[in-house]
């Protein structure tokens, strides 16, 4: 494995945390993702650092990585908080040889959602000795629903399985088992039996989400074997493009935006929801990535119901505007829920997003009552 035994920075891989509702064989995803683990667009994701004996320099390396993702232009924002209670991403620095992250909203309800198990200050972590950790960029990618690019089915990689397993047992601390290799390296991403929608790109050899491997661990295809998988330390153009596609923008002062699969549309504005008024949304059984935005300002404080209408799999999210930042209040289950019930306060400005998974009809809608 490229770098697995090279000098000071030999820990180049993370241990993936399986997504909730994953397949029985442990296969995972990447630019491959589950639609029902996305954060809602416009969420301000606050991250918190546990005190595990890390240095201020290591914290800075992770903060710089969050800032680098902020520069992409996707429609979520990362901000550090000193309050564990208000944090969405709770980051540890336990030096146990394992770096990992939960995937997307699977962070909800978990005390620790990310860990860095080795030093982030080695020369292998960045270019030109900058304090921008490649490991941190990779784990933050998981936190917004990216998974391992080398497991993209479009990569077509045939591994020298025995050589990889032996190398990971030798180079990693603690040693990786064959099962670890199956989950994190060999398993390909595929549509899950539970219907969770999965979308992928052409293989991106430059993605921050690849593991680095020397060519002797790869049997095919020839183009990948010729170079191996290199150690990437910055976000690729494709990493950035998919992040912006999955977290699209809208003009909150004006309507509704449907996200075209192949091009970012000009921002429009959300539709205003009114009680008992059905708002139709055009859907497609082919185009799986579509996000629609709505606003709602209740006239009274009480429990409300957001109801999806039509044969559709979609995830409904509700965000509250608190001091200019959108705080996620609730998400529906994109696989099974057709309604979301929650208490909303009078005269508050709520943002509602509907992320389409699959729809069997060309029209569906949402109503609030």
Image (tube, helix red, strand yellow):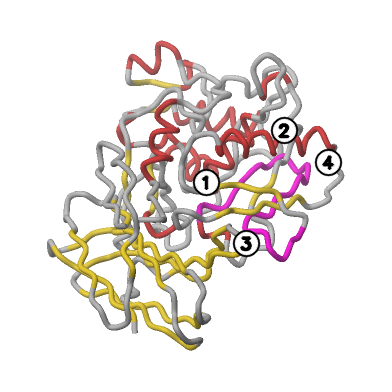
Which quadrant holds residue 130?
top right
Residue where numbered disc 3 is placed: 323
Instruction: Kindly identify the residue that appears in the image at 33 percent across and 72 percent down.
Output: 273
What span is colored magenta in the figure?
A: 83-104
Residue where numbered disc 1 is placed: 179
Q: Earlier in the sequence, mark 2 or mark 3?
A: 2
Of residues 331 and 5, the one drawn nearer to the viewer in this rendering: 331
Q: Residue furthest top?
A: 226
Q: Give x and y (percent) for residue 224.
A: 38, 18
Residue where numbered disc 4 is placed: 54
Q: Give x and y (percent) for residue 173.
A: 71, 37
Does residue 136 show up magenta in the picture? Answer: no
Q: Is residue 24 above or below residue 71?
A: below
Which quadrant holds residue 357?
bottom left
The answer for how far apart the CA atoms under marks 4 and 2 are is 11 Å
Q: Secondary structure at mark 3?
A: loop
Q: Secondary structure at mark 1?
A: helix
Q: Nearer the viewer, mark 2 or mark 3?
A: 3
The answer for how far apart the CA atoms under marks 3 and 4 are is 31 Å
Instruction: Kindly identify the residue that appears in the image at 50 percent across and 77 percent down.
Output: 347
Instruction: Kindly identify the residue that appears in the image at 53 percent across and 64 percent down.
Output: 328
The answer for how far apart the CA atoms under marks 1 and 3 are is 46 Å
Q: Secondary structure at mark 4?
A: loop
Of residues 9 and 359, the one drawn nearer to the viewer in this rendering: 359
Q: Are marks 1 and 2 in contact (CB under 8 Å)?
A: no
Q: Are marks 4 and 2 in contact (CB under 8 Å)?
A: no
Residue where numbered disc 2 is placed: 61
Q: Is residue 60 above or below residue 17?
A: above
Residue 342 relative to residue 290: left or right:
right
Are there few (<14), some (14-19), or many (20+) residues within 10 Å of tag 3?
few
The answer for how far apart the CA atoms under marks 4 and 1 are is 30 Å
């Amino acid at each position: 494995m490229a770098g697995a035994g090279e000098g000071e920075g030999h820990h180049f891989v993370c241990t993936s945390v399986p997504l909730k509702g994953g397949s029985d064989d442990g296969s995972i995803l990447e630019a491959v993702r589950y639609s029902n683990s996305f954060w809602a667009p416009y969420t301000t994701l606050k991250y918190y650092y546990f005190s595990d004996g890390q240095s201020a320099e290591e914290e800075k390396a992770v903060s710089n990585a969050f800032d680098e993702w902020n520069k992409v232009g996707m429609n979520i924002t990362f901000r550090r908080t000193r309050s564990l209670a208000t944090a969405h991403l709770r980051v540890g620095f336990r030096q146990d040889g394992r770096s990992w992250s939960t995937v997307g909203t699977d962070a909800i309800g978990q005390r620790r959602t990310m860990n860095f198990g080795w030093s982030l200050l080695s020369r292998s972590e960045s270019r030109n000795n900058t304090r921008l950790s490649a490991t941190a960029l990779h784990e933050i990618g998981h936190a917004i629903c990216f998974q391992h690019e080398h497991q993209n089915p479009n990569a077509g990689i045939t591994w020298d399985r025995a050589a990889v397993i032996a190398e990971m047992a030798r180079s990693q601390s603690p040693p990786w088992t064959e099962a670890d290799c199956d989950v994190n390296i060999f398993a390909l991403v595929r549509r899950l039996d539970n219907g969770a929608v999965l979308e992928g790109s052409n293989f991106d050899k430059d993605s921050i989400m690849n593991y680095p491997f020397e060519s002797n661990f790869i049997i095919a295809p020839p183009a990948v074997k010729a170079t191996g998988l290199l150690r990437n330390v910055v976000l690729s153009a494709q990493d950035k493009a998919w992040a912006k596609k999955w977290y699209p923008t809208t003009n909150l002062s004006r309507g509704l935006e449907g996200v075209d699969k192949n091009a970012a549309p000009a921002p429009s504005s959300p539709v205003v929801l009114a009680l008992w008024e059905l708002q139709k949304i055009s859907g497609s059984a082919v185009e799986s990535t579509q996000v629609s935005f709505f606003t709602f300002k209740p006239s009274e404080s009480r429990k409300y119901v957001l109801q999806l209408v039509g044969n559709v799999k979609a995830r409904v999210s509700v965000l509250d505007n608190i001091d200019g930042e959108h705080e996620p209040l609730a998400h529906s289950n994109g696989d099974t829920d057709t309604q979301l019930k929650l208490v909303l306060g009078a005269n508050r400005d709520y943002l509602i997003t509907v992320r389409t998974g699959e729809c069997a009809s060309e029209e569906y809608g949402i109503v609030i009552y």
